Structures are given as structure tokens and as C-alpha cells.
Amino acid sequence: MKNNSKSLYDRIPYIVALTTYFSYAMVICFGYLKDFIGKLFRRKKFRVPQGYARLLSDFEDFYTRRLYSRIRDCWSRPVCSAPGAYIDVMLRDVINYGEDLRINGKTKRCLNLGSYNYLGYADVPGGVDDQVLKALDFYGVSSCGTPNDTGYTDVHARLESLVAEFLNRPAALVMGMGFATNSQIIPSLVGPGCLILSDELNHASIVVGARASGAKIKVFRHNNPVDLEKQLRLAIAEGQPRTHRPWKKILIIVEGIYSMEGEICPLTEIIELKKKYKAYLFLDEAHSIGALGHSGRGVPEYWNIPHSEVDILMGTFTKSFGAVGGYIAGSRELIEHLRNSAPGCLYSSSMSAVCAQHILFALEQIMGKDKTDIGQQKIVRLRENAIMFRRRLIELGIQVYGDPGSPVIPIMLYPPAKIAAFSRECLARGLAVVVVGFPATPLLLSRARICLSAAHTSEDLEFALHVIEEVAELIQIKYNDKKMIEIQLEEEEEAIKASEERAVQNKITHSLIRNHETIIHGKKLLSSNHFGHDNETQDFNGIMHSGRDTQREERKTASFFQRKWNGMDIQWLPSMSSSSVDNNSHYRRMDSSATVET
């Protein structure tokens, strides 16, 4: 597989790369010159109290004062409305070249292309409001306790049960903060003597959690299974540092959709490697849950892979669900271990029951439990919006990054001056966007990150495209020529076609699995009649006894259809018996006694 990071650098025109480097060099040189003059004539401002060390590191302080402060009005803009399709932005006056920003009391209504409101649940008219308000009256604003003390309510229990059902996993737990879900859970999974293999573009929450675990960390190239396998082979061959003993366990950590790139992880190849080398897989679906897959079940559904193939499923409720917090889904043993050991469960207040009630509403609608197709329509609309908007940007000659179908679409800007110009010009025309530069991205790869929503109408997107085209002409960011446009459009069509084929395949597979499970259930009832048992009593006993056996059967059935898809006889499948299902399970328990086979 090609190295996507390298291919992105290859797209940069030579003259653009040269001018970008020159721009940063010029700003840095003038900044140091101003600091030198300031230390000579304004010593009081730069003076450090006697006996004290400088509180801020020199370069971080310099970057903030001389680079970031000049364009800081492009970030942290206060808003005074719900983050729906449109947003009210509070305008500010820039004081002394960005040293201070003061709200002037004016607001501007803008089309919102910056919030993570993928399915539109951050601003839902009707329905949800009554449920949330009732929860607010009954439970109050805060839980005022940890999940293991007094902060666990029946709303949390129902939410965890529904998340587990949604992801077809035995159990799940929810936490009050998305960032903490990674940073406080990972240290409970691995520790000294363990190895973490992390994608180089993983989120900061993963980086914090990995560093806090005490495990050895190795980074592999972004979305590059070839480099991942190279790192795995080398790590297993060498063993732990100094002692060369086998690793206690190896944990691969990837994201479903990378928030700054809009890329979808190659989950199929990664799962093959984790099976081959007996490693565990941690999948962060903060941006992909609800946004990918024909029913919103994330990257595994997008690639037509059973969720049971992933050892630890993580996601957040801050994007597609329009709320706060995150979840972990996996085996019952895993979840119980985390409840009793993870700092986020032991020392942090649980999610507000009000937010949990909102998530329940959104999740039930996505799953169709409200007996409507509103949730499914949102998923379809989001995908259509993402594909259309991305294609139109490419036709305009604008360089975009990421994969088709992703709600995150980066627009490449490159030079630092164009970061501020793009943000300010879009705001002036009624379009709210997020711009990103160094150090959040590599020095050359400054960009604007577009986040689409199911709440956006066709008219909204046409207005956004008109504004972006006008601004792109003004600041000259149409870097693609006609040949490159044709190449990218062909790649888009191929990727969209492959994705649609997987979606159809996934729907048929799930339909066959449901038919197969119905037949198995019918055979059990017939068997109970044959032995003289009452139908209702046998069925009740089966429900009470199911639990882990049911989940195991679902995993085996899904795994069977996944392996047997190519070349299968559809007419033959419904008549097959449960004995023909492969009994091998790829689930492994995540506990302190787990070791890696070399």
C-alpha cells in the first residue's frame, strides 16, 4: 500500500513549497529581530524575576507572540447559538496586532462548516427537547459522583446496553469526556513490558494515554500496513529493550477517520496483521461512528468486517450524536476490568444524565427503534453531501485530501498568510470554517478543515461552494491543473463505486445472517417440542441462558459469512445448520496475564 503522507507532499507545487518555506523563514527572522530590539529597549517586558527560570520555553513563547498572535483572531471565535447548520459568530476587534481581542457586541449569522455536527443532532427541533428537559428536572445538571459511587443512573445503564447492542458487542461503558476515554483507558490496558504500535497521525488523546501507560511506543507511517508489519516483525524479533524478553502484549492503535486528514483507515489489512502476529487492536471511532457504514456503525461496517474482529472499540458522542463523552465496547471481562481499574471510572465524575438521555434519543433514532427512518435518512444525506461537496471542490481545481464519503474534507492552503486570508474572507461572506496550521499540521501542510453535516441542505452547500470559489480565486489556492483534476475525479469515482459495492454486500450479508439466526432459533423450538418441553418455558430459559453464548454465536456467524462471501451459493445458505459454522474465535481477553506469541 502506498504511503499517503508522502503522496500528499508530492502534490505540492514546487513554487508553492518554496514560497511557504520562505514565508515562515521571513516571519521567524523578523520576529527574532524584534525580540532582539525589544530586549535592548524594553527590558522590563522581557525581564525574568531574579532567581526564577523562564516559565515558558523560549521557542513556544516566541511562536505564540510573533506568529500565532498575528492571526489569532482566526481561532477561538465565540458563538452565541447552537452549533447547527447555521451559527451566530460574535465579532471581535483586534487590539495591538493580536495581543488582545475584544468582543464588540456584534454578531454575524454564518453557515457552519466547522462543527462536528455530522448527523445534525446538535440542533434537533422537537422530540428530543422534552426528553432532555424531563431528565434535567428528574436527575439535575450533574451526577456529582464517579460511576463507581453515586454517579451511575438507570439512564447510563440503558445507554451502555444500547451501545453494546448497536456495535454487536457483549458490553460497553460510557465516560463523561471523549479525550479522557483514550487518555485514561489506554493506561489500564497496557503497561511496562508491553508495546504500543501507534499511527503517526493519531489524536493527541491517544498520545497522552500511550505515554501515561509506561509501555514502549513505536510509531508506524500513516495508514501504511507495510510499515506496520515491518515494525511488528522487528519488535517481536528484538523483544523488550535490554532484556530481549517477549512482550507481555502488543497493542495496535488506529483511528477510523483521521480528523485532520479525512482519511479512512485500511482496517482489513490491519486486522490481517493483528491476527498474523497475535496483537490486539484498539480502534478509535470518534469521527467515524455514525458517519460511516450504511447504518452508521463505523469503519468495521464500512469495510464489511464484523465488529467482533476488533478487540477494543472506542468512540465519542461529541460528533455524530451532538453530545459529550465517549464509550468503550468489547467483552464483558474487558469492560469489568476497566470499570475497576481505569482512572476515568474511579476518579472522574460520570456523564450528566441529561446528556446521556440525549444520546439515547439519537442512538435509538439511528437504530430505527423509534419506528421511523429519520436516522437512516440522516446517514444517507451525510454521505450524499460529502460526496457531492468533495467532487465539486475538485472540479474547481482546489486541492482536497482524504477519502470519498468522509464528512471531513481538508482544503489545502500551504502558505501561512493564506491561513488567515481564507478564514477572514470566508467569515466576511457568511461562512464559518476552521483553519489549521503548524504545529497541529506539518509545516507545509496548512489547511482548512471542512466538516459537513446531514443538517446541510443542497442550497446551503451551493452557497458554501460559491463562497469558497470566490475566496479561492482571491487568494489563489486553485493549485490543480486540468490533468490533475481529471485524475482525481477518476480516483473519486473508483473509490465511490467500491464503497457502494461494499455497502450492498454488507446489507445482503446482514440479511442472510438474520435469516440464518431465525432458522437456528426455529430449530431450537422444534427440538424443544420433540423432547416434550413447553415452547414458552424453553424460550424463556434460552433467553436467560443466552448472554455470552448468543454473542459468541453472532460472532461466529458473522465471521462465517465474511469468509464465505466470495463465490458462495446464496440459495444454499438458509438451509445450512449451526454445526457448519467455524468454531474458531479470534477474541482474546485483555488482562494482565496476556502474552504475545512470537
Image (cartoon, rainbow, N blue to C red):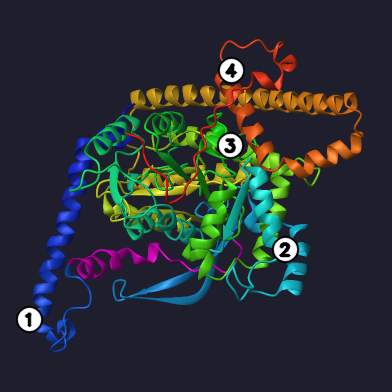
**Residue 383: image tag:** 3
Q: Is residue 33 above or below residue 210?
A: below
Disc 3 or 2, which lies upstream in sequence?
Answer: 2
Is the Cβ of the residue at disc 3 closer than 8 Å to that at disc 1? no
Of residue 41 and residue 536, the one placed in the foreground of this image is: 536
Q: Is residue 28 left or right of residue 360?
A: left
Q: Which residue is mark 1?
A: 40
Point out the tag, 2 or 4, that comes first from the N-terminus.
2
Distance from label 4 to label 1 (Cα)? 75 Å
Residue position for label 2: 154
Residue 212 visible from this viewpoint:
yes
Label 4: which residue?
565
Q: Is residue 73 left or right of residue 299?
A: left
Q: Residue at x 33, y 49 (%)?
A: 194
Q: Position of residue 536 (x, y in %)?
A: 90, 38
Please determine whether, in this image, residue 243 is positioned above or below residue 78: above
At x 26%, y 68%, the residue is: 64
Query: Can you tell which quarter of the image residue 581 is in?
Result: top right
Q: Amino acid at mark 2?
A: Asp
Q: Residues within 10 Å of mark 4 (few under 14, many from 20)?
A: few
Provide the major secondary structure of the magenta segment. Answer: helix
| Residue 293 image point, x, y percent | 59, 35
Question: Which range is magenta?
Answer: 59-82
- Specify the amino acid type for callout 1: Leu
Going by the numbered disc 4, the residue's amino acid type is: Trp
For the residues labelled 4 and 3, the Cα–Cα distance comes to 25 Å
